[in-house]
Amino acid sequence: MEKQQSKDPLHGVTLKTILEQLEAHFGFDTLGELVKIKCFNENPSIKSSLTFLRKTDWARKQVEELYISNYTKFTS
């Protein structure tokens, strides 16, 4: 029996990896425009953003949706 591979682009990807890839691709300036959250606009860092996103479901969902909409750019 073959293993089924998940079609979920978030499967096995940590929030830290998602954030690092988005920041590397867009930079915090653009991320702050695309996802209107304070941790991207004021003194941004991966650490502070992770702390906020782990506590705030609506913001995490927006970041995950941005990652999914740009998924092919990160997997090529």
Image: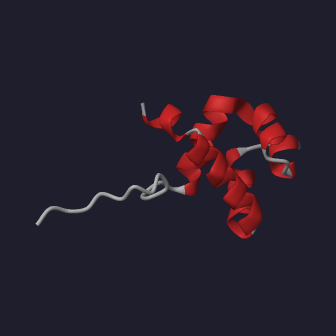
Could you tell me residue 22's position as x and y percent? 63, 39
Residue 15, position in %: x, y?
58, 55
Q: In this view, does 71 lie above or below 11?
A: above
Up the image or down, 33 lies above or below 68; here it is above
| Left or right position of 33 against 61 | right
Name the residue at 81% across, 32% down.
Answer: 29
Q: Which of 2 and 15 is in front in this view?
A: 2
Q: Quadrant of the N terminus?
A: bottom left
What residue is at 75 percent from the left and 53 percent from the top?
48
Q: Which residue is drawn at 36% across and 59% down?
A: 6
Colour scheme of this structure image?
Answer: secondary structure
Going by the image, does 37 lie left or right of 2? right
Q: Does any portion of residue 43 appear in the rendered image?
A: no
Q: Nearer the viewer, residue 57 or 43?
A: 57
Identify which residue is drawn at 43% across, 36% down: 75
Picture coordinates of residue 60 (x, y %)?
A: 69, 59
Q: In which quarter of the image is residue 56?
A: bottom right
Measured from the top left, where is residue 49 in percent x and y? 73, 52
Q: In which quarter of the image is the C terminus?
A: top left
Q: Indicate left or right for 64 with 44 as reference.
A: left
